[in-house]
């Protein structure tokens, strides 16, 4: 992606120069007329995503124009329809990157999408094969050319991820927490991870409650509780409705040298009878239950649903991390038990022990990490509870109390510092 970055620098935008990406398709796919069935726009401070969903794989080209700065996307083999005509109405006035959008039938076989820009961007385009309820998708992510990562390293991490450099730029050895005793010499650093986001809604309840919305509200409440403590500091992997790849979530926790990582979710199961709160930790030796294995598979599919063009597991084949991660998992189980004990006061437990499975988002070798399934959003009663401010606050307070209980033991403080 370094080439695309230079291609879409200010100099090239002013020149009106452009570049073309062609997505190869089979003759059969290209011969069949593609029907655009949905367009979605996800504006966020870190980047804006535009998704074009269609019945067949799309062939496209992209280039830039200047005065004013515009990004043009030509999609071949499609006809203008009501979905495409509605693109302009999807642009939010608060979008940091897109000022406006229009669409037209450029020639009998090509639809042209024109995005007028508010600032210079680095476009990142890729195709996604059908997954879950989604059909073929063409994804365009717009990243700022000039971004500051002083306060939040997310943008730099996303750039590294898209360039395939994330693993190269992370430390070869786990750094662990910052020097000093957490809570005494320095604040305890907590990374809060609201699951899903953006193109990935997570689980959806019977009454259309989306997991990504509920867990973000709980995460914000938890952050507020933590930041009121003089000896604690909270960060969030996302604080808006944006999709963040699982590896980037882990990398952000490592970059901030977190003492703990808490991923917040809301269960869904094939049966609406399933209910209760759960806490999970990482397992490197297989899941401790069928349910844990199922849940890990659904959560790890977030990248496929949310849409990423890269994949891979930095630690999958590196046994050098086994010892560090083994100790970390032990601490994760202790941390998880404290949170589970507190959750029992506000909701029934699905299981009275911390379950384990191969959750990708829990794989930072040096950071005790847990995944909290607050309740089953697929259960009608629990869906109603998840929507209430009262239950969201109770869950946040339970997790917070679990964090306090974990760090109350000075021996744990000494070990993690």
Image: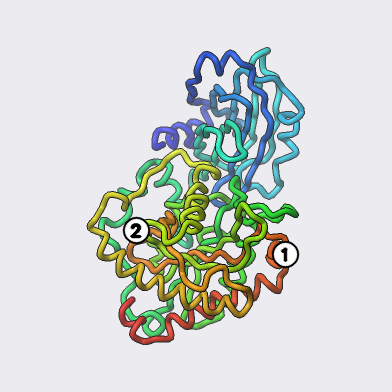
Tell me where residue 134 sits by quadrant.
top right
Mark 2 — residue?
Answer: 284
Give the side of residue 397 with respect to residue 176, left or right: right
Give the side of residue 395 with respect to residue 380, left or right: left
Please tell me which residue lies in front, 348 or 245. Answer: 348
- Which of the image's four quarters has the N terminus? top left
Disc 2 from disc 1: Cα separation: 34 Å
Q: Position of residue 259 (x, y in %)?
A: 40, 71
Mark 1 — residue?
Answer: 381
Q: Position of residue 234 (x, y in %)?
A: 50, 71
Element carrying mark 1: helix
Please tell me which residue lies in front, 254 or 407. Answer: 407
Chain-order first, disc 2 or disc 1:
2
- Which of the image's four quarters has the C terminus? bottom left
Number of residues whose C-alpha sits closer than 10 Å to that of mark 2, classed few (under 14), some (14–19) or many (20 or more) = some
Give the side of residue 68 with respect to residue 226, left or right: right
> How many numbered discs sit on the rendered protein?
2
């Amino acid at each position: 992606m370094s080439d695309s970055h230079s291609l879409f620098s200010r100099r090239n935008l002013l020149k009106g120069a452009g570049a073309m990406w062609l997505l190869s398709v089979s003759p059969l796919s290209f011969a069949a007329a593609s029907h655009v069935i949905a367009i979605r726009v996800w504006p966020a401070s870190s980047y804006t995503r535009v998704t074009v969903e269609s019945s067949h794989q799309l062939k496209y080209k992209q280039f830039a124009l200047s005065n004013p700065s515009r990004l043009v996307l030509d999609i071949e083999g499609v006809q203008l329809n009501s979905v495409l005509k509605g693109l302009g109405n999807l642009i939010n006035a608060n979008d940091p990157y897109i000022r406006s959008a229009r669409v037209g039938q450029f020639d009998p076989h090509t639809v042209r999408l024109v995005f007028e820009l508010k600032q210079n961007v680095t476009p990142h385009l890729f195709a996604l094969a059908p997954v879950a309820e989604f059909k073929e998708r063409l994804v365009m992510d717009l990243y700022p050319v000039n971004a500051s990562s002083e306060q939040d390293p997310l943008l730099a991490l996303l750039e590294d991820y898209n360039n395939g450099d994330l693993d190269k730029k992370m430390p070869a050895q786990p750094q662990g927490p910052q020097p000093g005793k957490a809570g005494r010499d320095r604040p305890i650093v907590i990374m809060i991870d609201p699951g899903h986001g953006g193109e990935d809604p997570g689980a959806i309840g019977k009454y259309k409650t989306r997991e990504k919305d509920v867990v973000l509200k709980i995460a914000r409440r938890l952050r507020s509780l933590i930041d009121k403590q003089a000896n604690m500091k909270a960060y969030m992997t996302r604080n808006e409705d944006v999709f963040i790849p699982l590896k980037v979530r882990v990398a952000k926790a490592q970059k901030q040298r977190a003492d703990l990582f808490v991923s917040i979710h809301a269960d869904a199961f094939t049966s609406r009878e399933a209910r209760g709160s759960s806490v999970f930790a990482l397992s490197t030796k297989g899941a401790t239950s069928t349910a844990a294995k199922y849940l890990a598979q659904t959560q790890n599919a977030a990248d496929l649903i949310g849409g990423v063009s890269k994949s891979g597991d930095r630690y999958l084949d590196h046994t050098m991390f086994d010892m560090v991660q083994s100790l970390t998992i032990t601490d994760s189980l202790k941390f998880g038990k404290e949170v589970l004990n507190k959750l029992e006061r506000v909701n029934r437990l699905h299981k009275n022990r911390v379950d384990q499975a191969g959750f990708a988002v829990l794989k930072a070798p040096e950071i005790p990490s847990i995944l909290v399934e607050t309740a089953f959003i697929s259960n009608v009663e629990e869906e109603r509870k998840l929507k209430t401010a009262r239950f969201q606050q109770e869950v946040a307070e339970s997790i917070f109390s679990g964090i306090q209980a974990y760090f109350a033991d000075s021996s744990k403080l000494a070990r993690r510092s």
